[in-house]
Amino acid sequence: MKSKLARFKVIAERENVLQPGKELYFNIKGNWNKTYFKNDNPITIELACGRGEYSVGMAALFPDRNFVGIDIKGDRIWKGSTQAVEQELENVAFLRAQIHTIENFFTENEVSEIWLTFPDPRPKKRDIKRRLCNNWYFDLYKKILEPEGIFRLKTDNTDLFNFTVEELQQRSDIADLKVTFDVYQSEFKEEVLDIKTRYEEMFASKGETIKYLRFRFAG
């Protein structure tokens, strides 16, 4: 408990973490580039970012882009926030918020790319509505993505992956959908940037293949 409380205290004072209690938290919508990043670079967000491995990794790889990792767990965000500070990365921030409230923090077309990496599969049928890759959430993501913006999913969970593909196949606004059940043995290997989260390493060590898909919304 002391460790968590200490981490909460740290991120409460960190400029690269936006959370309740900070003035910018309530005024950031539509103002990420102007107020926080102070540039016009495209914004990529990582949903349910956990420790923020992808957010930090991509920020290091692409200094001409901006990145926002989003998670509700402050002790997880602390890890990514700390790594960003240690690496002196000014093009990455962390937002402490529930994903279903994302419209409170990003305006229409403000985001150029979305990553969803190893989300909770929520296997029980009663939790389908809570899966971050159901069509209710896709409608939400569509609102904040720019017209040619890309959505990417990376997961070890076959059932969740199949569910996501089925959800997308029900829609009439999906374009350029690419799917693989083993990304590291596919033509899309380079797209995942050789960034591995703690969960990926854990599941891969158990023999799970890593599934990946990407698409954009059309119309």
Image (tube, rainbow, N blue to C red):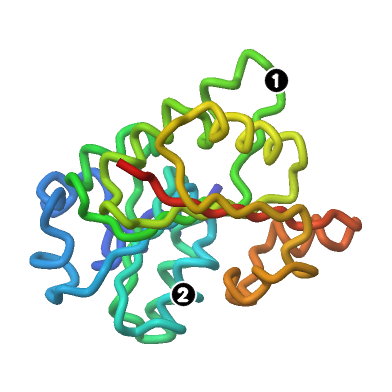
- Disc 2 secondary structure class: helix
Q: Amino acid at mark 1?
A: Lys
Residue wearing tag 1: 124
Estimate the x, y position of residue 76 in percent, counting from the top left.
51, 55
Q: Residue at x 52, y 21 (%)?
A: 129
Which of 175 and 51 lies nearest the eye of the viewer? Answer: 175
Q: Amino acid at mark 2?
A: Met
- Disc 1 secondary structure class: loop
When asked about the image quadrant of residue 141, the answer is top left
Q: Count neighbours of disc 2 (C-alpha within 10 A) and say few if under 14, some if 14 to 19, many if 20 or more.
A: many
Q: Residue at x 38, y 45 (%)?
A: 217
Contact flag, marks 2 and 1 (Cβ < 8 Å): no
Placement of 189 over or under 171, stated as above or below: below
Residue 187 disc label: none
Residue wearing tag 2: 58
Which of 160 and 28 lies nearest the eye of the viewer? Answer: 160
User: Gap between marks 2 and 1, in whole Å?
Assistant: 32 Å
Where the C terminus falls, by quadrant? top left
When asked about the image quadrant of residue 193, the answer is bottom right
Estimate the x, y position of residue 93 in percent, counting from the top left.
32, 65
Q: Residue at x 36, y 32 (%)?
A: 139
When asked about the image quadrant of residue 20, the answer is top left
Estimate the x, y position of residue 51 in percent, counting from the top left.
53, 60
Q: Mark 2 or 1 closer to N-term?
A: 2
Q: How many marks?
A: 2
Residue 4 in sight from this viewpoint: no
Which of 114 and 67 lies nearest the eye of the viewer? Answer: 114
117 vs 59, left or right, is right
